[in-house]
Image: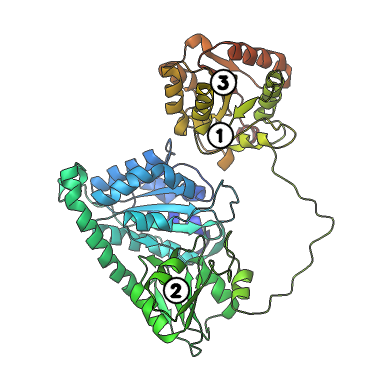
Amino acid sequence: MKKKRLLLGDEAIAMGAINAGIVGVYAYPGTPSTEITEFIQNSPAAKDNNVFCRWCTNEKTAMEAALGVSYVGRRSIVCMKHVGMNVAADPFMNGAMAGANGGLIVIVADDPSMHSSQGEQDTRFYGKFALVPTLEPSNQQEAYDMMEYGFKLSEERDIPVLMRVTTRMAHSRAVVEYDDAIEPRRELCNPKNPASWILLPANARKKYPVLIDNYTHLGQVACESGYNRYFDGADKSLGIVACGIAYNYLRENVGDDCRYPVLKISQYPLPKDLVRRMAAECSTILVMEEGQPFVEEQIQGILPHGCTVKGRLTGDLPRTGELTPDCVRASLGMQPHETFAPAENVVPRPPALCQGCGHRDLYNALNRAMEKFEDHKVFSDIGCYTLGALPPFRAISSCIDMGASITMAKGAADAGLYPAVAVIGDSTFTHSGITGLLDAANCNADIVVVISDNITTGMTGGQNSAGTGKLEQICMAVGVAPEHVRVVIPLPKNMDEISRVIDEEIAYHGTSVIISRRECIQTAKRHLKNK
């Protein structure tokens, strides 16, 4: 019996995955993808069916674990944000070559406009790069329905499937019609051709032409997919290609009856036959897509001379940032909706570290210790502690990617910088900082690594951190001398002690680690409330 429920796009994906009979969800928290895993973790149906749903150390380990599920013939999903795909790229690319035995869907949430990210990135390029089918739902109902469809496509074509959503799709709500029934798990079974999963050059050379040939067939599958639809229109002066959530924005402005022909695209490879049909009918094509001009550039490459293609590259839609119903409206030459003028008494509020946060006390002590050194540099990392770059602290000099603080500090020390200090969070350290510390310990690099341990993954809402209770042992295990693995408690009353410890480790010319440990103020509040 069909039921209805108001769901986030992330929640619709999660429910679709549960009902499709997944064995596990493998993920590292990252906005705007986090809620997929959290929904499954809190789902009674997932618990009743023993769905594995603990957080992974990073996106690479998550991707590899899901490949293991696929190898034995069962279904799983991998969830991450767009920059997480960079971390998972090695097993993702090679997983496409190996194929899929049980259905495998890799779900990536892009963040156009960089609401909580250090860059814009369009994951559809990864789908084309790896030669795998890509799904891009235009609404929450499609996000739910596509899970079962994606698993079947993965199993029929023996290949992982990529699903790409963006911030507004992930974090907006709509009513979704769903079925409570959960598909039974498939029996354990080994791959038909085990050699496909052994990517020795001799095997890979055989697999690659098969992968390319399969991608050609997937283009025809996309043309015939119910998620790619061609809607005719009386006015052929313009044809509109609307991808993913852009189709939703188009309908918000024109309703169900657009006077122009519309090609809705929610499955890739690009359905070239449908594009050519539009080009034969329309002299101008307007491409609406979230992210980079992925489809716009491809259309320019396949259409004959005389057909004009407009979109993000031509300035008809913004080149950067996320689409909105208003900018889609403007691209159609429609008058803007009447809006209210901004309130004069609204003051911008930049993000700041929470009052009572241990990172604050750490940065106060670190600034006190570093002010002795002219033009000092502190290399930092991805996490809520990155806000230490802002006033009143201005304590850090860099933030590039997960784990870069330690290796950048080492490189700077190799080049002669003294002192070279790195600040990294506990979750980021276990995500991708351990190998950098191993590099430093192997040559006893003259650096001080400060692990700001708030005993959680604070930036994404307080998920469990993989290194909780193990950080000292990890640091010593990779080769840091035990006497130079120090622990401090970041509180105002301990300011003199913390500054002294920092001074002592800077004076030591070798690799040292200072663990600044105090629970995140937000998770501490929740724990007190739940007692």
Q: Looking at numbered disc 1 in the image, what kind of residue is underneath it?
A: Asp
Instruction: Write down the residue under mark 2.
Output: 264
Say if 96 sits above or below 172 in the image. above
Residue 375, horizontal then vertical, whole percent: 68, 25
Q: Earlier in the sequence, mark 3 or mark 2?
A: 2
Seen at 61% across and 11% down, the residue is 504
Q: Earlier in the sequence, mark 1 or mark 3?
A: 1
Residue 402, horizontal then vertical, whole percent: 50, 37
Separation of residues labelled 2 and 1 (CA atoms)? 40 Å
Q: Quadrant of the N terminus?
A: bottom left
Q: Is residue 520 left or right of residue 9?
A: right
Residue nearest the observer in this picture, 241 or 375: 375
Seen at 45% across and 80% down, the residue is 307
Seen at 37% across and 38% down, the residue is 61
Numbered mark located on residue 515 in the image: 3
Comparing labels 2 and 1, the label whose residue is closer to the camera: 1
Q: Is residue 111 left or right of residue 187?
A: right
Separation of residues labelled 1 and 3 (CA atoms)? 15 Å
- Residue 414 visible in rendering: yes
Task: Classify mark 1: residues with Cα within 10 Å, few (<14), some (14-19) or many (20+).
Answer: many
Say if 355 sits above or below 501 in the image. below
Q: Looking at numbered disc 2 in the image, what kind of residue is underneath it?
A: Lys
Q: Secondary structure at mark 3?
A: strand
Residue 149, horizontal then vertical, whole percent: 34, 63
Instruction: Write down the residue under mark 1.
Output: 381
- Residue 461 visible in rendering: no
Comparing labels 1 and 3, the label whose residue is closer to the camera: 1
Q: Looking at numbered disc 3 in the image, what kind of residue is underneath it?
A: Ile
